[in-house]
Image: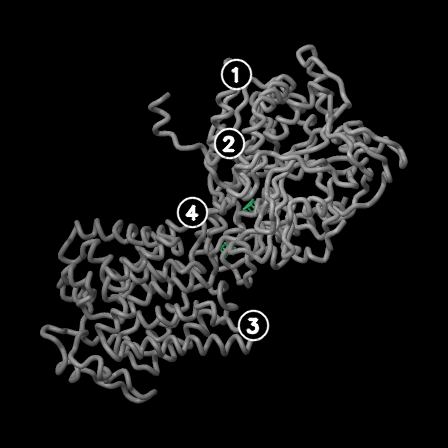
């Protein structure tokens, strides 16, 4: 083993890019609590799947931690009150980072209300059946905190005939600027391991591997110190590279297995969870509590007090921006990381369960400066960057002449997961990823119209 | 809410970061890499080479501007790619090439080789080589007239043929060469010497460029070093020249072993003629080479092999130009048969 290790390089996937990390601003800062905003906006659709259904009425008093909406279907989760206060509305329209407005429950926070969560009761997990565990996960309202916002309990029920043998825990956090997962791994190691245990039981997985990028070796060490003796959970360093944290990439780095095109990790016996998700589950499930806050990295040149903040779900960006002293020159606020996140058009957008970071830029920095767009010079940089091995240059040329169908039928458009590597490297500054998003949505609409 | 929403003005889509390398930067670095090669050429051949380079650049720039204006595209001279074409073109011509012909070559390089296809990124062949191929056909005598380097007074006077008037009978440089040539100058390039007289030029002379030949094929070593600079800055695909040399060696090696009298050694093949310049600066032209990882190897090997075949078995001593033009034409085909397997595709293809 020792000798073998000498010859083994840090596991990784093929291609990808190395953007500047910009993590030093916040990586050393412990998680801090953000005060309650005077008004909280909890959107009913902040996860992938059917929106939740409100359980409360305007004028009703709610206690922090109390359920305020129930799951609207199997692929859906309940919501819990992030603050103690009075419900003002249950169908107020708030803007989202993605653009369209969505109904939200609005709560006016009681001044000086306590941070403590009084709601919930202790439960002994060891006595729970698998089904009861899955129910408990669903009741917590947990979704993927890494950004996907996919309801966590759905992954626990593999389709007929599929078995999950390995649990992969994603601690890569490959987006520049973001450090919230890093802090969670350092500060909430016990909760993380408790969460892994729970999910292993719920899935029946035989082993669990935590993959952490090798720019966070302190986290690897912190976790390894706490690993249980039985050896079913391990922690592996993987190469620091974007998008190492993408599900498919991490699986091939750690297991050398590929998720089939158009398929899911479960097809090859794998379930992937983000470290933040499991750390939260490890804390919430034993107390049968719901997800009401999350750690958010707030960083970037436009932030005066960058850091990792524990933010109540539903806190409007404007309140957050005031708290972190965002500069008055801020001209771009990104929800998520700078590689895959979205620029918001309005600061009324609330923090939702899937928001891992808020990055604020002032005047364009060196690596995000606007440049003229040139024709493709066929340099091939995008081919060398695409982790899926697509041909973004060809796809881009087809997109510019609107041959969207050919892109799909012959150049595997639907395998593109919009990581942005191709756009990032393109010296001609062609907005390739944006082209692909448009092409996909046009194809989707065409299919819907035909059906 | 105390903040004004109007402050958030930029709405862009991800990724919000860009690698700090642009087309202009790549092109500018190619220009830097070519400057020493041009400099050496001027040092070797003097005033004629200097003016030759300036004329082709000027001609290319003017042609590009003209076509941009005609087609209503924004003027693209600023992206430096035309300057590269101008420099490369000059480097493939004999140093004493009549300047008016050089101007025609520049016009053809851009007009026929690039603008016709829609400008930067759309051409299908290397514009400089298109320009050279045109003048090769149009002015066969002038393009095979070589003059010696390092002549006295080369910085003060032109090689007489440079100043030939358009469409007049060609100037005979024989007398000038006789009066200026260092001992033993035959006017033949190392390739011609080797092919027709079986005289091999020493490797040292090839490396340093103490041979006759076109303005820029002189010092193989210098061209190699300049190419390395680009490869190190990741602005050139090193696999292409490597594949060209490999292809050339693969075919010239066995031939040389069979009959060293007639067939030169791989080293000679690689160092002589325009192969070094072609492999480093023309075959690597991004626009017209394939992008697929296996495709670049195949493409380079095709160039290397074709070069040797044309040199040895064709009527031309200068095979590189045609080899690259042919490979350019094959490039889309090469790319399409070397598409890499995508992530997660099953063995039978993504459909199954
Ligand atoms: S955005 Fe799509 S095409 Fe571009 S690199 Fe990522 S997966 Fe490949
Ligand atoms: S990176 Fe841009 S310029 Fe280069 S091949 Fe891809 S699309 Fe073309």
Using a 10 Å C-alpha cutoff, classify the residue at mark 3 as few (fewer than 14 neighbours), some (14 to 19) or many (20 or more).
few
- Direction front: furthest residue: A112
Label 3 marks a residue whose chain is B
Q: Chain of mark 2?
A: A
B243 on left or right of A258: left
- For mark 4, does the 10 Å Cα neighbourhood hold few (<14), some (14 to 19), or many (20 or more) residues? some
Chain of the residue where label 4 is placed in the rendered structure = B
Beta carbon at label 2 within 8 Å of ligand 1: no
Q: Quadrant of the C terminus of chain A?
A: top right
Residue B129 point in image, percent of width and height: 37, 68
Tell me what residue is drawn at x 29 percent, y 77 percent: B50
- Dot 1, how many residues are within 10 Å of its Cα: few (below 14), some (14-19), or many (20+)? few
Q: Would you say A281 lies left or right of B150 here?
A: right
Can marks 3 and 1 be said to lie on one chain?
no
User: Can marks 2 and 4 be said to lie on one chain?
Assistant: no
Label 1 and label 4: CA atoms lie apart by 44 Å
Q: Nearer the viewer, mark 2 or mark 4?
A: 2
SS under mark 2: strand
Q: Nearer the viewer, residue A69 or A244?
A: A69
The quarter of the picture where residue B181 lies is bottom left
Q: Which residue position is annotated with label 2?
A: A212
Report whether residue A265 is seen. Answer: no
Whole-number angstrom distance, CA of label 3 to CA of label 4: 33 Å
Horizontally, residue A382 falls left or right of residue B130, namely: right
Write down the residue under mark 1. A228
Q: Which residue is mark 4?
A: B293
In this picture, residue A307 sits left or right of residue A286: left
The picture places residue A254, in percent across and down from the top left corner, at 49, 29
**In the rendering, which numbered label is found on residue B73?**
3
Q: Give the CA distance from mark 2 to mark 3.
A: 49 Å
Indicate the secondary structure of the residue bearing disc 3: loop
């Amino acid at each position: 083993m020792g000798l073998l290790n000498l010859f083994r390089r840090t596991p990784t996937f093929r291609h990808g890019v190395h953007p500047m990390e910009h993590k030093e601003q916040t990586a050393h800062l412990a998680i801090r609590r953000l005060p309650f905003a005077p008004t909280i906006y909890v959107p009913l659709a902040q996860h992938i799947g059917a929106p939740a259904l409100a359980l409360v009425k305007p004028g009703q008093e709610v206690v922090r931690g109390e359920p305020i909406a129930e799951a609207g279907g199997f692929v859906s989760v309940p919501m819990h009150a992030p603050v103690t206060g009075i419900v003002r509305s249950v169908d107020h329209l708030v803007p989202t980072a993605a653009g369209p407005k969505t109904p939200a429950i609005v709560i006016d926070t009681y001044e000086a209300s306590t941070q403590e969560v009084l709601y919930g009761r202790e439960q002994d997990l060891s006595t729970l059946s698998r089904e009861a565990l899955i129910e408990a996960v669903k009741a917590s309202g947990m979704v993927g905190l890494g950004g996907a916002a996919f309801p966590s309990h759905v992954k626990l029920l593999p389709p007929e005939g599929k078995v999950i043998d390995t649990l992969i825990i994603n601690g890569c956090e490959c987006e520049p600027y973001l450090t919230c997962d890093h802090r969670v791994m350092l500060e909430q190691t016990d909760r993380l391991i408790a969460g892994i245990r729970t999910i292993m039981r719920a899935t029946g997985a035989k082993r669990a591997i935590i993959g952490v990028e090798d720019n966070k070796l302190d986290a690897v060490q912190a976790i390894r110190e706490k690993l249980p003796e039985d050896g079913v959970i391990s922690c592996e360093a993987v190469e620091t590279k974007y998008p190492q944290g993408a599900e498919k990439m991490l699986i091939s780095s750690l297991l050398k297995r590929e998720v089939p095109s158009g398929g899911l990790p479960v097809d090859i016996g794998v379930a992937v969870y983000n470290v933040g998700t499991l750390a939260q589950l490890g804390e919430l499930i034993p107390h049968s509590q719901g997800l009401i806050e999350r750690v958010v990295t707030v960083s970037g040149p436009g932030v005066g007090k960058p850091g990792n903040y524990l933010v109540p779900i539903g806190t409007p960006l404007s309140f957050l921006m005031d708290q972190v002293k965002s500069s008055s020159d801020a001209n771009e606020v990104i929800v998520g990381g700078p590689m895959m996140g979205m620029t918001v058009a309005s600061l009324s957008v609330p923090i939702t369960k899937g928001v891992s970071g808020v990055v604020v830029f002032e005047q364009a920095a060196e690596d995000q400066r606007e440049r003229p767009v040139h024709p493709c010079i066929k340099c091939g940089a995008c081919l060398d960057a695409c982790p899926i091995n697509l041909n973004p240059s060809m796809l881009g040329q087809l997109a510019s002449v609107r041959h969207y169908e050919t892109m799909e039928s012959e150049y595997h458009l639907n395998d593109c997961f919009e990581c942005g590597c191709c756009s990032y490297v393109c010296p001609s500054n062609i907005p390739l990823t944006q082209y692909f998003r448009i092409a996909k949505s046009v194809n989707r609409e065409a299919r819907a119209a035909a059906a | 809410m105390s903040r004004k929403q109007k402050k958030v003005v930029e709405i862009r889509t991800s990724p919000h970061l860009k690698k700090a390398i642009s087309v202009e930067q790549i092109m500018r670095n190619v220009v830097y890499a070519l400057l020493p090669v041009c400099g050496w050429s001027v040092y070797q051949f003097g005033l004629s080479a200097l003016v030759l380079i300036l004329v082709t650049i000027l001609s290319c720039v003017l042609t590009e501007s003209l076509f941009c204006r005609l087609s209503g595209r924004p003027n693209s001279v600023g992206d430096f790619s035309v300057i590269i074409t101008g420099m490369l073109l000059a480097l493939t011509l004999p140093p004493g090439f009549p300047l008016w012909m050089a101007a025609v070559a520049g016009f053809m390089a851009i007009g026929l080789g690039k603008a016709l296809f829609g400008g930067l990124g759309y051409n299908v062949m290397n514009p400089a080589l298109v320009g050279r191929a045109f003048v090769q056909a149009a002015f066969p005598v002038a393009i095979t007239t070589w003059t010696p380097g390092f002549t006295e007074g080369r910085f003060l006077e032109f090689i007489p043929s440079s100043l030939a008037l358009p469409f007049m009978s060609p100037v005979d440089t024989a007398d000038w060469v006789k009066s200026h040539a260092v001992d033993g100058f035959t006017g033949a390039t190392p390739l011609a010497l080797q092919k027709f007289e079986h005289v091999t030029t020493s490797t040292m002379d090839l490396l340093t460029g103490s041979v006759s030949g076109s303005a820029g094929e002189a010092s193989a070593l210098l061209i190699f070093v300049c190419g390395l600079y680009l490869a190190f800055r990741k602005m050139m695909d090193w696999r292409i020249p490597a594949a060209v040399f490999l292809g050339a060696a693969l075919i010239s090696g066995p031939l040389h072993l069979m009959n060293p009298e007639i067939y030169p050694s791989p080293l000679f093949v690689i160092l002589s003629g325009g192969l070094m310049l072609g492999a480093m600066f023309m075959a690597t032209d991004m626009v017209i080479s394939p992008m697929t990882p296996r495709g670049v190897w195949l493409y380079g090997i095709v160039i290397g092999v074709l070069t040797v075949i044309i040199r040895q078995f064709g009527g031309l001593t200068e095979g590189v130009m045609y080899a690259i033009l042919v490979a350019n034409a094959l490039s889309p085909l090469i790319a399409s048969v070397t598409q890499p397997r995508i992530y997660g595709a099953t063995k039978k293809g993504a459909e199954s």
